[in-house]
Amino acid sequence: MVTAHDRRYLQSMNKQTIESAILALVEQRGAGKSICPSEAARAVWPEEWQKRMREVRGVAVGMARKGEISILRKGKPVDPDDFKGVYRLSLPVASDAPPEADG
């Protein structure tokens, strides 16, 4: 029987695996280029990647919030908390940086 603790552990391991896959793929692709999130899903789950796209999206949103990657729509960075539809992932884009406070 799988306990709640076991489920949390597996979810944590999945998250780390997805993060590692996303980072490896965007770094391999390089600056100014992007990956389809399905590439990360396929890298982690070759047989059932389609079922895992929601997980990949959730991890990508968290990574974008931390500034580790950018989420792109039509080639432009978007707010990770407010985007819909087809998206891509890239290394952080300079325009994603929070504006500097005037002082």
Image (tube, rainbow, N blue to C red):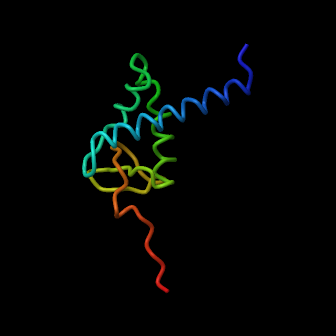
Label tally: 0
Is residue 100 found left or right of 9 in the rendered image? left
Q: Residue 54: x percent and y percent?
A: 48, 34
Residue sitting nearer the eye, 10 or 36: 10
Farthest bottom residue in view: 103
In the rendered image, the vertical position of residue 38 relative to residue 103, given as above or below: above
Residue at left offset 67%, top offset 30%: 8
Is residue 77 found left or right of 62 in the rendered image? left
Farthest top residue in view: 1
Residue at left offset 54%, top offset 35%: 15
Q: Residue 19: x percent and y percent?
A: 47, 38
Q: Residue 86: x percent and y percent?
A: 33, 42
Is residue 10 found left or right of 63 in the rendered image? right
Residue 25 found in image quarter? top left
Residue at left offset 43%, top offset 19%: 48
Residue at left offset 43%, top offset 25%: 44
In the rendered image, the vertical position of residue 59 relative to residue 2, given as above or below: below
In the rendered image, the vertical position of residue 94 relative to residue 43, given as above or below: below
Q: Quadrant of the N terminus?
A: top right
